[in-house]
Image (tube, rainbow, N blue to C red):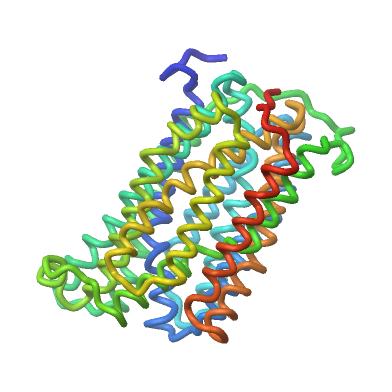
């Protein structure tokens, strides 16, 4: 293995962190805007928002198991990453030409198709490049850079909205310009990947079969628990729309922001609350990964599920604007404690030659539920009110936390 850039963090992991940093700047410039664009500009109902996000995430997840298995079989990770990041880069500016929600669905499908191609191979390369005792730290480091990009992206979008508003652009034109500008950081990420990430191709395994029966009992239980949690974990678009609902209908916008951002004040505040979540996520992803190296992935994930349950309950029952800021900040702890840690946990539970397949299975199992979760959330919102999807998500997270305690052993697994 190459020398450490930071103790336990190799060159490939560091560069892949930068790749994700620029990719997330691009993606997160758009993510808090897309649901507002869909509902306010294209007049799509909540059920359509859920359908689009569900199809997008499920597309990515279905591909992740295939691309992960193929990367194990071929002994190569980088080609899947290049094609995946390139497709996502192309998808960003296409949103600028959307006249109906169907075009947004197509662009999101292409973007998530790219994510499906790259994610399992990338995470497997991170694991391949890292000693087992530093695996949580390496995944946490990668997620930290990823989430720092997720902080910067919405702030860039907010500054662009402010500038364009001052120059008398309407929101429709402003959104479309941001979709075009988001192409630039996405292109940088592809160039970094092409020229600075290296891999020593492994041996082809033409006889490698895809059989769930080859995986351990603990890994299968981990997948089951992840599915239970995921059925209540709808797209973050619903959190953004819930914040927009609270700030728009119940007030709670600080006067200093009102005086600064003028006509699009609610949009600005919603984006800022999303930035708070990403700040928390970025600050604590690496410490959470390091903690999982010490006390076990399972224990850290239990804490993350419980935090999710509390936050979703809060979004269900509050109409106070100031609590939205607090809830988004706490929500970042959930992501920090589960995102990178869950992938490190999946890797711990399988042999080294099946890491890509295992991560792909995890992504696919949870992503298939993302379609159901987002459709359920959209229907619950339309039929039973804004609180309903969050009450459902809170309950499912609590069930998943109890299952982790009851069904998986407390010891850490390292392969």
Q: Report the residue at 25% width, 67% height from top.
A: 268
Q: Quadrant of residue 17?
A: top left
Report if residue 69 is visible in the image. Answer: yes
Is residue 175 depicted above or below 332 in this figure? Answer: below
Pick the front one: 361 or 331: 331
Quadrant containing the N terminus in the rendered view: top right
Q: Report the residue at 77% width, 44% height from top.
A: 221
Numbered-mark total:
0
Q: Where residue 112 appears, x then y in whole percent?
A: 57, 58
Q: Report the residue at 35% width, 59% height from top.
A: 274
Quadrant containing the C terminus in the rendered view: top right
Instruction: Classify residue 311 as left or right of residue 382.
Output: left
Q: Where residue 121 appears, x then y in whole percent?
A: 64, 38
Is residue 347 depicted above or below 373 in this figure? Answer: above
Report if residue 63 is visible in the image. Answer: no
Pick the front one: 337 or 111: 337
Q: Where residue 299 appears, x then y in whole percent?
A: 59, 36
Instruction: Classify residue 276 as left or right of residue 341.
Output: left
Q: Quadrant of residue 180?
A: bottom left
Instruction: Classify residue 121 as left or right of residue 134.
Output: right
Pick the front one: 260 or 69: 260
Is residue 60 depicted above or below 269 in this figure? Answer: above
Q: Where residue 201 appears, x then y in whole percent?
A: 68, 25
């Amino acid at each position: 293995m190459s020398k450490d850039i930071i103790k336990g963090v190799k060159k490939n992991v560091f560069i892949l962190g930068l790749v994700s940093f620029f990719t997330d700047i691009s993606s997160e410039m758009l993510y808090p805007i897309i649901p507002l664009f869909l509902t306010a500009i294209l007049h799509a109902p909540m059920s359509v928002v859920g359908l689009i996000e569900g199809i997008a995430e499920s597309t990515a997840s279905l591909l992740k198991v295939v691309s992960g298995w193929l990367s194990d079989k071929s002994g190569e990770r980088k080609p899947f990453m290049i094609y995946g990041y390139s497709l996502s880069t192309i998808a960003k500016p296409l949103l600028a030409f959307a006249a109906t929600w169907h075009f947004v669905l197509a662009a999101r499908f292409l973007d998530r198709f790219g994510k499906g191609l790259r994610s399992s191979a990338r995470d497997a390369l991170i694991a391949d490049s890292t000693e087992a005792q530093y695996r949580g730290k390496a995944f946490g480091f990668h997620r930290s850079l990823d989430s720092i990009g997720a902080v910067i992206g919405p702030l860039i979008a907010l500054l662009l909205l402010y500038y364009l508003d001052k120059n008398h652009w309407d929101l429709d034109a402003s959104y479309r310009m941001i979709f075009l500008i988001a192409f630039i950081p996405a292109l940088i990420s592809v160039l970094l990947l092409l020229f600075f990430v290296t891999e020593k191709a492994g041996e082809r395994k033409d006889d490698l079969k895809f059989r769930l029966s080859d995986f351990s009992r603990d890994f299968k239980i981990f997948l089951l628990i992840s599915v239970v949690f995921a059925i209540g974990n709808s797209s973050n678009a619903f959190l953004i729309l819930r914040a927009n609902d609270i700030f728009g209908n119940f007030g709670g916008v600080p006067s200093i922001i009102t005086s600064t951002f003028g006509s699009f004040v609610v949009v600005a505040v919603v984006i800022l609350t999303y930035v708070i979540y990403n700040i928390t996520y970025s600050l604590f992803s690496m410490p959470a990964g390091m903690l999982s190296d010490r006390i076990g992935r399972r224990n850290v994930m239990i804490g993350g599920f419980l935090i999710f349950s509390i936050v979703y309950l809060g979004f269900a029952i509050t109409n106070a604007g100031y609590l939205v800021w607090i809830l988004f900040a706490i929500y970042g702890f959930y992501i920090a404690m589960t995102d990178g840690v869950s992938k490190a946990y999946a890797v711990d539970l399988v042999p080294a030659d099946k890491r890509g397949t295992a991560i792909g299975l995890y992504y696919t199992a949870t992503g298939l539920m993302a379609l159901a979760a987002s459709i359920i959330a959209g229907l619950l919102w339309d039929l039973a009110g804004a609180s309903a999807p969050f009450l459902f998500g809170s309950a499912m997270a609590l069930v998943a936390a109890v299952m982790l305690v009851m069904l998986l052993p407390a010891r850490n697994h390292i392969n």
